[in-house]
Image (tube, rainbow, N blue to C red):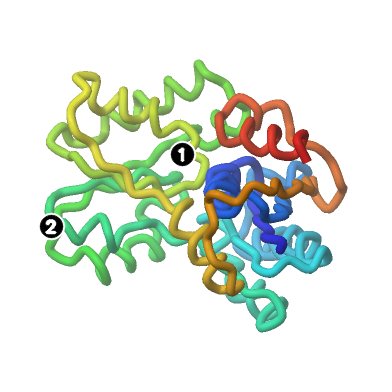
Amino acid sequence: MKIALMDSGIGLLAAAAAVRRLRPDAELVISSDPDGMPWGPRTPENIAERALAVAGAAAALDPAALIIACNTASVHALPAIRAALEPRIPVIGTVPAIKPAAAGGGPFAIWATPATTGSTYQRGLIREFADGVPVTEVPCPGLAEAVERADDTAIDRAVAAAAALTPPGVRTVVLGCTHYELVAGRIRTALRPDGGPLTFFGSAQAVAAQALRRAGITPAPGAAQVGGLTVLLSGRTGVLPDEALAYPEGRLLQTVSTAH
């Protein structure tokens, strides 16, 4: 069985690792766009164009499902990618986990890129799922880019700036960019240096489980067989970038690939 994931960069690592943990024997295809990133500053039309190309490269390897492990691509390209690939290949988009975060009724914050923060898309999700719940939208300029570069100093600076904008009483945070899940520990430390309770709502586990469901694959986290890994960089076969190996999720994939 083969599961594909796509993103502009290494934000897909969290979802790829989640798939790997649910099905260690799955063949993974991760398709990114180092030639065209970052996608955030591009026009919606150009984002859709590049996302379609990255998705098409992965689809050419005939996966059982494709995860769009990128909030930006899901906003601007999900309908086009589904039109191109479904029903042959199920396509799973990534949506900020606002609905489950709001279910507790308490105040929460949404950390997202500046382009997503305050967008019609995000505000629509808040109106639909969090009406009446106190929500703080927190822009995180430079954080995704710092994570992509594995630049520790820039990551800490961007996390600190976002933490300063987060109300001190907030104990629930939606991670509205897939890159942020790779530095959840640093975000936790910045928001709760006292080690107090803090709940994160990300997307990696949910989209991984949904991809397996759509592909008709039963989770088997204890599977002994180890699946392989194919890395596509703007359509070219390559290897995991060094920056990916700065994160446990990237090292997990590398270990699996080497073992295979």
**Residue 249, position as x, y percentages in the image:** 57, 36
Dot 2 or dot 1: first in sequence order is 2
Q: Is residue 103 left or right of residue 148?
A: left
Can you say which quadrant of the picture contains the C terminus? top right
- Check disc 2: other Cα within 10 Å, few if <14, some if 14-19, many if 20+: few
Secondary structure at numbered mark 1: helix
Residue 138's tag is: none
Q: Mark 2 belongs to which amino acid? A: Gly
Image position, residue 210 (x, y; %):
50, 66
> Relative to 215, does residue 221 appear above or below in the rendering?
above
- Identify the image quadrant of residue 149: top right
Q: Image point 65% across, 65% down: which residue?
A: 66
Residue marked by disc 2: 105
Binning the other alpha carbons within 10 Å of mark 1 as few (below 14), some (14 to 19) or many (20 upward) gives many
State the separation of the CA atoms marked 2 and 1: 24 Å
Dot 1 amino acid type: Tyr
Percent position (x, y) of residue 153? 50, 16
Q: Quadrant of the N terminus?
A: bottom right
Judge left or right: residue 140 versus residue 56: left
Q: How many marks?
A: 2
Q: Is residue 84 above or below residue 136?
A: below
Residue 158, by quadrant, is top left
Q: Residue at x 56, y 73 (%)?
A: 214
Asked whether, in this view, residue 159 is left or right of residue 20, the answer is left
Question: Which residue is labeled 1 in the image?
Answer: 180
The secondary element bearing badge 2 is classed as loop
Residue 191 percent location from the top left of the image: 26, 28
Residue at 54%, 57% (x, y): give it. 220
- Which residue is most to the bottom? 87
Residue closer to the observer: 82 or 19: 19
